[in-house]
Amino acid sequence: MATKKNRFPFTEAKLRALPTPTAGRSWWYDTKTRGLAICKTHTGAASFYFYKWHDGKPGRERLGTFPDLTVQQARDGAETRLGRIAAGEDPFEQRRTRCQEPTIKELWDHWLLYAKAHKKPRSVEEDERNYKLHLVQLAGRRLSTIKKSEIQALHARIGAGWEEKVKKRTVHRGGIYGANRVLALLRAMFNQAGDIGYRGNNPAAGIRMFKEVARDRFLHPQELEAFFQALAVEPPLFHDFFAVCLLTGARKGNVLCMKWADLDLQAGYWRIPETKNNTVVVVPLVAPAVAILQERREAANGSPWVFPGHRHGTHLQTPQGAWER
């Protein structure tokens, strides 16, 4: 509240001599320029503010730090805002709009609902993992405060990768593939931001992804013998699973979800009803693959899955690390 004691014509010397409050903050008001005030906190920091009632409501806007901002510069800033009020503008509208703007957390909550309705469960799990690992630290930020340069720096940092200890095990995080997935997630999230009232630009748009090299790893002839030797000691279920993966060249996830209804062993083909690219793929089956599948069918015991799991009605879950062995 302004009183005679805290109202005076501002000068550099008087402002430097202001006492530091023992707690909280104290306010002083300039008698030469309406609306100009200075606030000093218990830490000793002082800042200029434009403070005025407008349309029956108090409004406050920070102008800058003293003494980085001079008294005359602060007065010029206050005069500019008084002129905007005289012209019928609301100088506090932008700040109020920004305070009501959605945060990254609110955008993520909206995106998660959208993703669960339109994406595969595995893709949703990947989005959740990337958000918790790389984006949760931005949760409280307003959308308009997220800058393109900030996302570029995040993309580069994830792309460089790092290592950390997880339960006494060294885990490599990040890399170019992970960086690209995080960038794609942010871009997709901001594309949906208009649904929750955001009218700004997409700061993730226009950022180039890292070039990804297609994986073309195959077993060489000299490796096949060692592979089949290792396969021979696996339990029959896993032996057949890895053998079918090798003989079809299909993705691990597709083989895990293989159903008898999708197989025609007499004609020698496997129809994958839904792939990662949301397309139907027909895979021809070589004779050794057909032989393995015929043996599995005889032992199917009524399960719809070619490689059933221990729980009824589920498919096989490969043991952790088995795919990398």
Image (cartoon, helix red, strand yellow):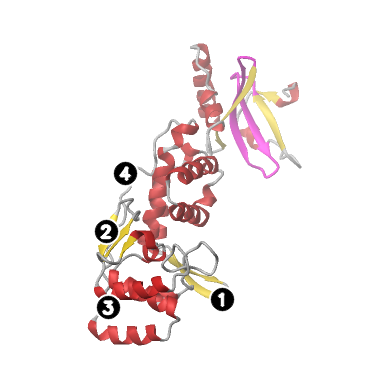
Q: CA distance from mark 1 to mark 3?
A: 32 Å
Q: Residue at x 39, y 70 (%)?
A: 297
What amino acid type is highlighted by mark number 1? Lys
Check disc 4 and report the residue beneath it.
206
Query: Which class describes the residues within 10 Å of circle 3: few (<14), some (14-19), or many (20+)?
Result: few
- Residue 307: image location, x then y, percent: 43, 69
Q: Is residue 41 left or right of residue 223?
A: right
Q: Nearer the viewer, mark 2 or mark 4?
A: 2
- Residue 315: image location, x then y, percent: 47, 65
Q: Residue at x 39, y 41 (%)?
A: 203
Question: Range of the magenta residues?
Answer: 30-56
What amino acid type is highlighted by mark number 2? Val
What amino acid type is highlighted by mark number 4? Gly
Q: Secondary structure at mark 4?
A: loop
CB atoms at circles 2 and 4 under 8 Å apart?
Answer: no
Check disc 1 and report the residue beneath it.
168
Q: Is residue 36 magenta?
A: yes
Q: Is residue 147 visible?
A: no
CB atoms at circles 1 and 3 under 8 Å apart?
Answer: no
Q: Nearer the viewer, mark 4 or mark 1?
A: 1
